[in-house]
Image: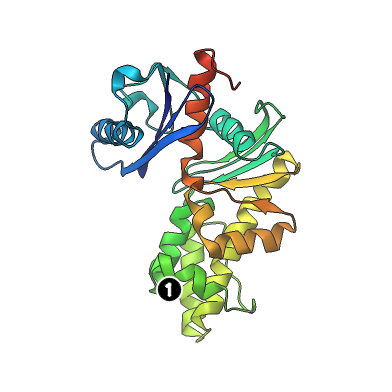
Amino acid sequence: MPFAGIDMGIQNVKVVILDDDGKILARSISPSGFEPAKAAEQTFREALSNAGIRRDDIKHVTATGAGLDMALEADSTISMVAADAKAGVYLLPSARTVIDVGAEESRIVVCDERGNVLDFTLNERCAAGSGAFLEAMARALEVRIEEMGELSLKAKGTASISATCVIFGETDVVSLIHRQEPKHEIARAIYDALAERIISMVHRVGLKPSVILVGGVAKDIGFTAALRRKLEAEIFVPNYPEYAGALGAALHALAKAGGNIQ
């Protein structure tokens, strides 16, 4: 009998459905929009359709994310920190440090081999440590966010900016533009600044290998390159990293209902 996890993110709603052996049957994602509850219903229906099952087939649903209270289908809830730990070990059994960089928040989670949280730290209410920082800097640089990663890979690292605040970072970018610094160098400086912010969070809890990177920003090649360069450690990036929260919630649902994965 299947189990489902819903991640009620600020930017997107994600759903993952598992079978009773923990195999992923379906994924679905939709913008949260102005009515997250409706977005969750739509995303859940799409996941059910993708899995070829009905709502009555689902044994347990767990919600997580900033808007978890709006997940009307949920039978239980789990924190994003705990969901990250569960998903991290599922995706990489040797994972002990999970780095989650999302649109509005970042988390560093240290866990054990069973996906239990040992320590964590959050970057809350500050866009400088999240995907929103990259979006703001891309606007200042007048490039599409989808293009900025490739652009940064051409750079040698001749420029730098501040990641202590989006406003300061944007001011630095404008100054570099006025100095006619090449766009690819500015792009790399932007990613380096975000990576340094994330690494400062890692240092608060301590780095334990292996390291897995999840969240929507994990799909950005400019950021992953910067983080690997600055952290000087092996970093595993799974397929579909943006679904980690929903996956962790689905794993919690499976464990709640006595499934085969704890």
Residue at 49% of width from left, 13% of height from top? 257
In percent of width and height, residue 42 lies at 25, 35
Q: Is residue 81 left or right of residue 71?
A: right
120, 239: nearer the viewer:
239
In percent of width and height, residue 184 lies at 52, 78
Q: Is residue 128 visible?
A: no
In percent of width and height, residue 256 lies at 51, 14
For residue 215, above or below residue 38? below
Mark 1 neighbour density, 10 Å: few (under 14) some (14–19) many (20 or more): many
Q: How many marks?
A: 1
99, 115: nearer the viewer:
115
In percent of width and height, residue 91 lies at 60, 39
Residue at 47% of width from left, 81% of height from top? 177
Instruction: Specify the amino acid type for callout 1.
Output: Leu
**Can you tell which quarter of the image residue 71 is in?**
top left
Residue farthest to the front, as pictured: 52
For residue 175, above or below residue 59? below
Residue of label 1:
141
